[in-house]
Image: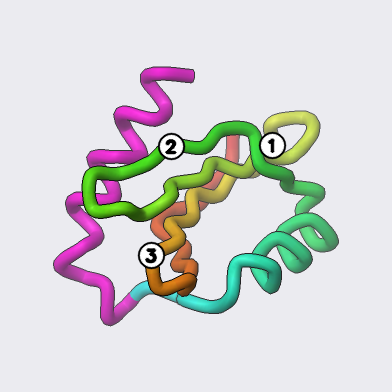
Amino acid sequence: MTKCLVAAGALLLMASSASAQMLCKERTTFLRHLGATYSEAPVAMGLANNGSVLEVLSSKGGGTWTIIVTKPSGLSCIVASGEA
């Protein structure tokens, strides 16, 4: 899981310059949608140096995953998602 958080942190750094292209909404909106559509739930969390919370969500079978970042302002953005 540590490798996953390190990779997610690297994605967060790379995505900061492309933040205008990220999908951002309230955290609860993402959790409801990802849970209902893909059966994803939070499996790991971490705190970034800038105060943002990084979350990894995964489906029960591990078939899909999503990484979201919640900024101190409360806005959450999808940083990455995929399968397997």
Q: Position of residue 54 (x, y in %)?
A: 43, 47
Q: Amino acid at mark 2?
A: Gly
Quick one: 82 or 66, which is closer to the camera? 66
Quadrant of image for the C terminus: top right
| Residue at 38%, 65% in the rendered image | 72
Q: Position of residue 40 (x, y in %)?
A: 73, 47
The answer to whether residue 44 is above or below residue 80 is above
Q: Are marks 2 and 1 in contact (CB under 8 Å)?
A: no
Quick one: 65 or 52, which is closer to the camera? 52
Q: Amino acid at mark 3?
A: Pro
Instruction: Give SS at disc 2.
Output: strand
Which residue is labeled 2 in the image? 46
Instruction: Give SS at disc 1.
Output: loop
| Res 27 → quadrant | bottom right
Range shown magenta:
1-21
Quick one: 74 or 5, which is closer to the camera? 74
Mark carried by residue 63 = 1
